[in-house]
Amino acid sequence: MKIGVTVRNMGPQSRRDTLRACAEQAEALGFESLWITDHIAIPPDDAEGSGGRYTDPLTTLAWLGGVTRTIRLGVGALILPYRPTLPTAKAIATAHELTGERLLIGVGLGWMDAEFRALGVERRQRGAVADQQLDFLTRCFSEPVVELNGQPFIFDPRPSQPPIYVGGRAPHALRRALRFNLGWLPMARDAASLRGDLALFNQLAAENGRPPGPVTAFAALPLSDRESARDELAAWRTLGIQRLVCAIRYEDSSGYRRQLDQLMAL
């Protein structure tokens, strides 16, 4: 099981010096991947913890690719209905190629009403929009000439398709992942809470005559209690998932390093 860690692309911790220092520390300590999140329009009454500041995820991943060399770079999850289809595919392909094919793309449908209103996007259509974008995105990485709105065109740069994981809860996210032959990106309280959904993923995959896609899970470990954290990490390893992304809480790069050191000690 691979171990990734989050880094804050929100609030004061998303200033360039702190963001760079945290990314460099995670890479130097050998963590497999570094993950950020996605919000685009936080209303004033819901800004606690971030102050309403979120850096754009794809721009941030591209920038992180320039200040690191080997660590993989993920977003969990990029909200597809917030973004235009072709420019988003182009940005993903460009960043993936220029970072040496290090991107990991979690995708989601979105949930915050205020953001949909700010964008002028119909929230009730988000599932259909996401499906259309996933269909187009996966075609972009497999076909040199693609078509959108009746117009064929060359899609280039065209690196290998980055791993794509469908975020969200079972069973809807599982069915969408299977439909597009993608992985799953759940957020879980602990390992035990995910066992039933993983069994369902395997069941649905068998019914569809295909293996389930890889699973990357987001969770927080109780790092202040080393014994409990070790037990929980061991429980995660027994699940057979591809990757665990550990949520890291911190105020500055020194606090981030302390959390990474505690995680390394498990």
Image (spheres, helix red, strand yellow):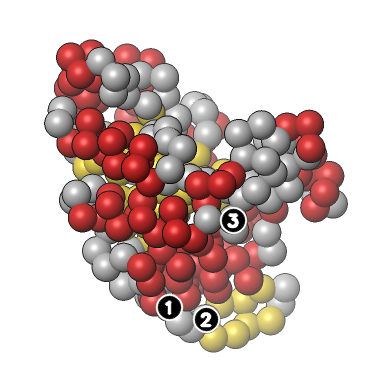
Q: Amino acid at mark 2?
A: Phe
Element type at mark 1: loop
Q: Which residue is mark 1?
A: 158
In which quarter of the view is residue 202 placed? top left
The mark that comes first in sequence, 3 or 1, is 3
Checking the image for residue 99, the label placed there is none
* Alpha carbon separation for disc pair 3 and 1: 25 Å
- Position of 4 with respect to 14 (left or right) is left
* Alpha carbon separation for disc pair 2 and 3: 27 Å
The mark that comes first in sequence, 2 or 3, is 3
Checking the image for residue 155, the label placed there is 2
Tell me if label 1 and label 2 are in contact, CB under 8 Å.
Answer: yes
* Alpha carbon separation for disc pair 1 and 2: 6 Å
Neighbour tally class for label 3: few under 14, some 14-19, many 20 plus, Cα within 10 Å: many
- Position of 80 with respect to 8 (left or right) is right
Q: Residue at x 40, y 59 (%)?
A: 20
Q: Which residue is mark 3?
A: 55
Report x, y in % for residue 21. Answer: 36, 56
Residue closest to the eye, 146 or 256: 256
Report x, y in % for residue 66. Answer: 38, 71
Report x, y in % for residue 101. Answer: 33, 69
Tell me if label 3 and label 1 are in contact, CB under 8 Å.
Answer: no
Element type at mark 3: loop
Which of the image's four quarters has the N terminus? top left
Neighbour tally class for label 1: few under 14, some 14-19, many 20 plus, Cα within 10 Å: some
Tell me if residue 194 comes above or below residue 81 in the rendering.
above
- On the question of residue 129 being in view, the answer is no
- On the question of residue 21 being in view, the answer is yes
Query: Of discs 3 and 1, which sits in the foreground?
Result: 3
In which quarter of the view is residue 24 placed? bottom left
Q: Residue at x 43, y 43 (%)?
A: 252
Q: Amino acid at mark 1?
A: Arg
